[in-house]
Amino acid sequence: MGGSISVGRVGGWAFALGVGAAVLTGTASASADTGDSGSTTSQSTTAHAPRTHAGPRAADAAKRQRTTVKDRKAARRAAKDDAPATNRPVKPRKAAITTPATTTASAAADRTVVASGLNAPVDFQVLPDNRIVVAEKGGKIRIVEDGAVARRPLVRLPVLTQGERGINGITIDPDFADNGYLYVAYTTRGARDRLARLTVVGNRVAFGSQKVLLQTTDRSALYHRGGALGFGPDGDLYWGLGDNKNGANAQDLTSLHGKIIRLNPEGSIPSDNPDLGPGALPQIYAYGVRNPFRLTFTPTGELLVADVGENSYEELNLVTAGGNYGWPGAEGYCDGCTSIDPIYEYAHNGSGAAITSVLVYTGDVLGPEYQGKVFIADEVQGWIKVLTCSADFSSCGNAQDFDPQAGSSVVLRQAPDGSIYQLTYSPGQLVRISGAPSAVSSPAVDV
């Protein structure tokens, strides 16, 4: 790829996303590497498939949402100290949460570069045989093995790359060792958001194996593409799709944009997806999100989503079936709103911000004090922080600095050995964090 650096907006700040290219139009085409097979699933015509299991924490959420929200807000108010409210460009927010103290790292975390020389990497997954697949924004998915980046890519997808277009997220099938399925969310050359399944054989994607699971029908804007992608403990595939630079899409149940999508692995619709009323697209699991960049599931099955904010607040949300997370009418906590508040927010405070990672740590390499903690990272501000959450993940707080100079994180994932892998956008590196920094206490702050 060649050209000049393209700078797009993620949240309220410029976010360097990759190398620009001329706008390509027309229908999405198959690449020479993969081809295109299987039928495309439109956003309104997929048949329902019989299901017997329920999604994470899913139980009549559409009917019970108002009561749940009211109870959650009351519990949060009772559990946290009030501080003077601040002016907001959206609906009134709750008082700031004052934590007893934060911790500032006095020495860097133990970091080792696993792979370097990656070109604007955006996501990665560890395969069962410990090879690592890394997706680059420009369309290449590469294999990292024994610290070396394979010269020949696993696949090269035909994508648009302006702004936040390109590959946005990847995940692997829970049965990857048997079926080789790799799932990719990307922007086609026809400027559509596509979720597709590829079949990996050895160090290549099998020619003609691409199966399109879902594709939007409206043109993809330059920004707010989302990219959160992963399998839940229920075996279903969850995809966070941004609002397509139009906040109204997030509340429009006839649009896929600004939503958390839930599908069966082959692209059909789970029979227990929430019923959101006449005309609502059946693929929608939750709505009212702006730019859901990353997601993760807790050990007990809760779905956590990092949603990049606009000019004021970044959000970490506990997503449940049928939930409305308020965008564009709410950004951060919102008193008087019927939407669901985030379980954690932090303010931009006049600078840029973009929450781009969320991880629930269950390893023992970093020490017992990090067991069960939630790690978040901000690509723009360049830090990694650790949150303490309630047992049911209904609220989080007591933010502590883990690495204030972590760089441009786009993904944090736990490695098989219990360390943490960090992928940075620029420089394009995969890093292993195998030791916690030493720390000193600092005064209480508002978060």
Image (spheres, helix red, strand yellow):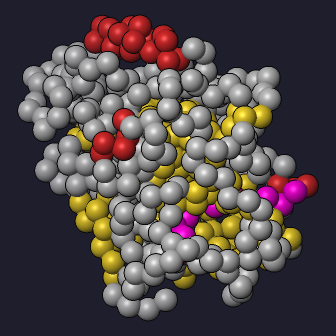
**The quadrant where residue 289 appears:** top left
Task: Report the residue that reaches farthest toward the bottom.
Answer: 2
Query: Does residue 443 lie above or below 162 as drawn?
Result: above
Whether residue 238 is visible here, answered yes or no, is no
Tell me which corner region of the image, top left, top right, bottom left or bottom right, holds residue 66. Answer: top left
Residue situated furthest right in the rendering: 178
Q: Can you give x and y, in whole percent of width and height, for residue 144 in the image? A: 70, 73
Q: Is residue 401 left or right of residue 276?
A: left
Q: How many numbered callouts? A: 0
The region drawn magenta spans 179-189
Which residue corresponds to the image point at 22% horizontal and 55% vertical from the top-left? 12
- Taking the magenta stretch, the answer to whether it contains residue 188 is yes
Q: Return the residue nearer the eye: 179 or 298.
A: 179
| Percent x, y of residue 166 | 50, 70
Residue 22, image x, y percentages: 39, 85
- Vertical order, 44 against 210 (above or below): above
Q: Nearer the viewer, residue 258 or 344?
A: 258
> Can you see residue 162?
yes
- Quadrant in which the C terminus is drawn: top left
Q: Is residue 109 magenta?
A: no
Where does residue 151 sit, x and y in percent of width and height? 69, 87
Residue 13 as seen in the image, left or right of residue 377: left
What residue do we see at 36% from left, 66% from top? 222
Q: In this view, does 160 lie above or below 215?
A: below
Tell me the residue at 77%/68% (across/down). Answer: 37
Is 151 placed left or right of 287 in the picture?
right
Residue visible at 54% across and 37% down in the picture? 281
